[in-house]
Amino acid sequence: MASLAVVGLGYVGLIHAVGFTLIGHRVVGYDINRAVVESLRRGRPHIYEPGLEEALRKALESGRLKFTDSLEDAVAESEAAFIAVGTPSAPDGSADLSQVEAAARAVGRAMRGKKWYLVVVKSTVPPGTTEGLVAGAVAEESDAELGVGFSVASNPEFLREGTALEDFFKPDRVVIGAGDEKAASFLLEVYRPIEAPKIVMKPREAELVKYVSNVFLALKISFANEVGLLAKKLSVDTYRVFEAVGLDRRIGPHYFGAGLGFGGSCFPKDLRAYIKLGERLGVDLHIAKASYVVNEYMLQYAVELLEKHLGDLRGRRIGVLGLAFKPNTDDVRESRGVELAKMLVARGAVVYVHDPVAVEKAKAVLGNAVVYVEDPQFLVDNTEAVVIATAWPQYEELNYTNTIVIGGRRVKKAREAKIYEGIAWA
């Protein structure tokens, strides 16, 4: 049993704090936000994730998990710290590493006096960050020598919001980018209860694995959308096409969901950071750039379809069903529904929005610019056109027969609308 600290209790950090506890380790979860810490101590997660509240309760009842807003306490009681803070996009599209650096420096200060400590980067960072920025910051603040008084590692996460707990306990692989053998041995022992291939490599290799994984999945979605635009002109159902294409074992069936494109906390920002990494190294990443262009176009195309059916959007009542970037999460970061609502408001439309779990987080972004509706059927009945932006299961139960629907996500019941137009399928 290892003693671990998790630094940052957002989606990634909280899932790992709970997960590490439930596979037998002692965990101290740290967050700078005292309100988050207090809520978690009471067993109330501040994020929505299926099964998380029950898992958190079990972890707390085990006596091996606690939360604190004192990083000094978290480091004092642990052998390793997993840094799981945000790496949002900087204004130029590159990864903003300020939170990672701040966390590394704080851990470095807190670990003074320890004989050895492991600093693990969970956050998605450009290759070279763990061995460079993080190791340098820790060494400077702790006065310890890399490889002697402390080690570093990159251990990227591959969690999908909505299935994050399952992804923790049953991952496709565990990637360990170890700075030395001691770090590798420690992390292999931490993950020993997890039955999955464990791949040990250099830190910068592990960092690149994370970027390549996310960029490739984004490429698949953009490819599906581009095929969808073509299929629509041919009066072909894109989903039927990819159902057959996906049976080819060389290709696989996943991430071919044509629609409004990808959003969320990972794909858009990681794609931008990957492109900027190429620019910094003098490599023009044409395919990645094209994926980003296609993704942004899908939102513009949704607006064009609304204008096709309604004309000038000023004063028009338009509904957006879905504000979370995908079902089974309340995460609205770069959500297609939120971004579309902004675009419609900018064109003078009166925008009604609904989401079963993400409204409160959407309010922080949209404010009073839109009308928030609790009943999705009311939204459908009281608007002139509806765009389905998130494929929540309850949207299959609505009556769309008296409205215009732009299918930004595939909801079969919506085909019964007075006028129905799929964004990337016939």
Image (tube, grey):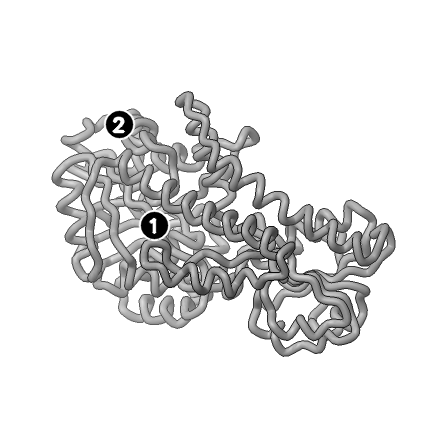
In this rendering, the answer to whether 183 lies above or below 370 is above
Which x, y percent locates residue 305? 74, 54
Q: Nearer the viewer, residue 378 or 387?
A: 387
Q: Earlier in the sequence, mark 1 or mark 2?
A: 2
Q: Is residue 293 left or right of residue 7?
A: right
Identify which residue is drawn at 50% across, 61% down: 241
Q: Residues within 10 Å of mark 1 (few under 14, many from 20)?
A: many
* Quarter of the view holding residue 425: bottom right
In the image, which is nearer the foreground, mark 1 or mark 2? 1
Question: Which residue is at 76% across, 55% downward?
Answer: 306
Using the image as rendered, state which of residue 216 and residue 230 is in the foreground. 230
Mark 1–mark 2 contact, CB under 8 Å? no
| Labels in figure, total | 2
Is residue 389 depicted above or below 417 in this figure? above
| Residue type at numbered disc 1 | Glu
The quarter of the picture where residue 363 lies is: bottom right
Residue at the (30%, 38%) spot, across then down = 110
- Residue tagged 1: 157
* Kind of residue at badge 2: Ala
- Which quarter of the image is occupied by the N terminus? bottom left
* Mark-to-mark CA distance, 1 and 2: 25 Å
Q: Residue furthest front?
A: 234
Horizontal and vertical percent for residue 362? 63, 55
